[in-house]
Image (cartoon, grey):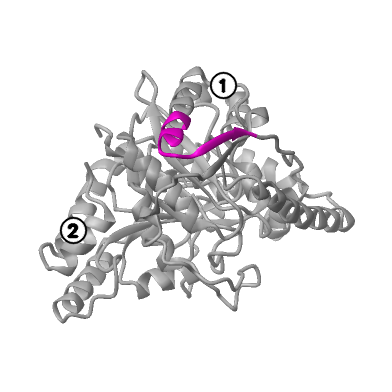
Amino acid sequence: MHATILELSECLRQREISPVELTRDCVEKIQNLNPALNAFITVTAESALLQARQAEVEIQRDNWRGPLHGVPLGLKDLIDTAGVRTTAASAMFRDRVPTEDAEVVRRLKQAGAVLLGKQNLHEFAYGGSSVISFFGEVRNAWTPKHIAGGSSGGSASAVAAALGYGALGTDTAGSIREPAALCGVVGLKPTYGRVSTRGVIPLSWSLDHLGPITCTVTDAALMLQAIAGYDAQDTNCVNVAVDDYLAALNRGIKATRVGVPRKFFYEDLDPEVSSAVGEALVVLKTLGAEISEIELTVPADRTLQAAESYAYHAEFVARSPELYQPETLRRIRTGEKISAIEIEESRRELKRMRNDIRQVFEKIDMLVTPTTPIVAPALAELKQNPDLLRPRELALLRNTRPFNVWGLPAISVPCGFTGAGLPVGLQIAGPHWSESRLLQVAYAYEQATVWHKREPSV
């Protein structure tokens, strides 16, 4: 099993391993495996080694900054990094070099993390496959013949292949959880406003979330701890106290009320997905959770996302439309004719839905669904039949998208594999600001199963 951040942090703190050796090992793995996976766009080996040497010196002087100190991590390539190009996987930004770090990058550096580079994604995060990228498609670490999901596909595939011990991704309709599910790792989308998105290239300001992709729930908790918290310069960030996420993990889930929304979320499932999730519900019940079926009114309107995406890209589209991949350009232009009145109505409706969803949690504590109704499609199928790309992406993001609208925290954890060896994900979601309880339930399930211990042969 891959070493976890938690395991590494203690070894680093006790000086049993060197951050420099750890970083060199990751850089070597990237050099060996990235040609097959295409998970990284830019590898910052030189600066990563400098950061590792600094971490080593600090730890030797008993100046240990915390669990991420000296740990190599990756960043989705739409998160700004000062002096390092940030491309959003597009020709439009292929030479874009920010002068300032995103707030989350600043916090990771403050925590002493070593940043390995920028990871491939679906162009401008506008899709769920990571097939569309100026730098080529991302391939799944479990089987490079299949997609890694999107839009944080490079981040999920890299973590699965141990090209770093964690990554930061973004999630507007499922772009952390969906690729995490397809790549057999953990993906956490916190509550809207829990983590600053300042310095991150937006897809939709009202729906964008940022969070960790890791091998275990504990590691997700450690990464969230480093990046969560109020940013006064981010108008979408909310000043709500941050818990001790690690301390919450071992509290158990006895009498936790779990709601199972069969309608919509459990419809048209791949039989092997259905079987794996059914077995996961049995595990939760065995652990003491109280399972009950509920019904939810699921939001389907995408007016606001389309409008906000077009608003960001309008100037670039007018100036250089040829620099976009054709399908990305088509998607962006769907927001071109949405009126100001429609946008305002959509924002009011979003606020209403985020308020109304609170009532659901008067009767339950958590929601559990399949992360995706299907497993990772084959790359050849999508490339040979381009008309399949959109319906496959819509299916993959069907179960994750509503939680962005509601702004609820949600996590995907591995819950099984198909007969062909493709991972299946379980999605757990809770009320606003319930990350501690969410992690607690996810951790209890993870520790009762073996899925997180499996590794891809790559």
Closer to the camera, 101 or 280?
280
SS for callout 2: helix
In magenta stretch: residue 449: no
Q: Quadrant of residue 203?
A: bottom right
Q: Is residue 369 left or right of residue 451?
A: right
Are there few (<14), some (14-19), or many (20+) residues within 10 Å of tag 2? Answer: some
- Quadrant where the image shows the N terminus: top left
Q: CA distance from mark 2 to mark 1?
A: 42 Å
Residue flagged by tag 2: what amino acid is it?
Answer: Leu
Q: Which residue is mark 1?
A: 385
Residue flagged by tag 1: what amino acid is it?
Answer: Asn
Residue lying at the far right of the rendered structure: 341
Instruction: Indicate the position of residue 50 as horizontal and vertical percent values.
Output: 23, 71
Instruction: Answer with mark 2 or mark 1, whichever residue precedes in sequence.
Output: 2
SS for callout 1: loop
Are there few (<14), some (14-19), or many (20+) residues within 10 Å of tag 1? Answer: few
Residue at x 62% of width, y 47% of height: 403
Q: Is residue 150 left or right of residue 391?
A: left
Give the label, 2 or 1, closer to the camera. Answer: 2
In magenta stretch: residue 288: yes
Q: Which residues are magenta?
A: 281-293
Instruction: Indicate the position of residue 406 as horizontal and vertical percent values.
Output: 67, 51
Q: Which residue is mark 2?
A: 22
